[in-house]
Amino acid sequence: MSVLLKLALGVDWISRRLGWLASIAVLLTALISAGNAFIRYGFDVSSNGWLEIQWYLFAGIVMLGAPIVLKLNEHVRVDLIYGKLRGNAPVYVDLFGLIFFLMPVMTLMAYLSWPLLVKMYLTHEMSNNAGGLVRWPAMMLLPVGFGLMFLQGLSEIIKRIAYLRGEFEMDTHYEKPVQ
């Protein structure tokens, strides 16, 4: 199990680095958005390329930031049931969800998005907007992001099994979000 735990911790390390990159993309998106607004309303000049780069950065924020959200246990769940569970029950619920929902869906989404990426790359698909950008870099974030979520899901499964076997310490405390 120690080899698998090392793999899981390596995936966690990658997710933390990509989460940092996603947080930088948030800042860049805000700066570009503010700059676009200033130039558009201040100088009556606009660029579709700068508008589209915001969409690309947003795709990066979501697809590169999702694995760290899963790692930090801050993802969406059914609080009505989950918040009332005690002992190892939340860990078993997590394992069930990871194995039977997250992993199959991430596999399917990566599988379905890959041909679209290949097609966009081979045809050099461009935005229909004047001054728009090539689309494959944004599309690449889909199979990559789903693949990263799959890896983080695998990491979470490994850590939870190791926790249940007493081989890994994990914080199982869950605090219901304030609403």
Image (cartoon, grey):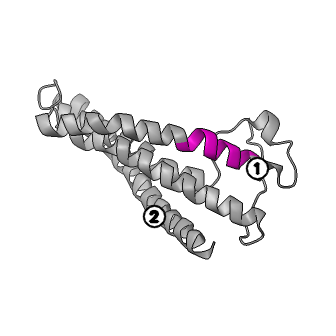
Disc 1 marks a residue whose amino acid type is Tyr
* Up/down of 33 relative to 23, above or below: above
Which of the image's four quarters has the N terminus?
bottom right
Disc 2 marks a residue whose amino acid type is Ile
Which of the image's four quarters has the C terminus?
top right
Which residues lie in the magenta part? 93-103
Total numbered circles: 2
* Circle 2: element type: helix
Q: Looking at the picture, how far across and down is residue 153, in whole percent?
A: 56, 52
Q: Looking at the picture, how far across and down is residue 87, in whole percent?
A: 87, 55
Locate residue 140: give its quadrant.
Answer: top left
Distance of label 2 from label 1 (alpha carbons): 25 Å
Callout 1: 10 Å neighbours few (<14), some, many (20+)? Answer: some
Looking at the picture, tell me which residue is in the foreground, 92 or 74: 92
Residue beneath label 2, please? Answer: 14
Residue 1 in view here: yes
Numbered circle sitting on residue 92: 1
* Circle 1: element type: helix
* Up/down of 158 relative to 42, above or below: below
Callout 2: 10 Å neighbours few (<14), some, many (20+)? Answer: some
Side of 90 relative to 162 (left or right): right
- What is the residue that sits farthest to the bottom in this orientation? 2
Residue 75 in view here: no
Side of 170 relative to 103 (left or right): right
Q: Looking at the picture, how far across and down is residue 45, in whole percent?
A: 15, 30
Instruction: Tell me which numbered mark, 2 or 1, is placed earlier along the sequence.
Output: 2
Prevalent SS, magenta region: helix
Residue depicted at 73% across the width and 72% down the height: 167
Numbered circle sitting on residue 65: none
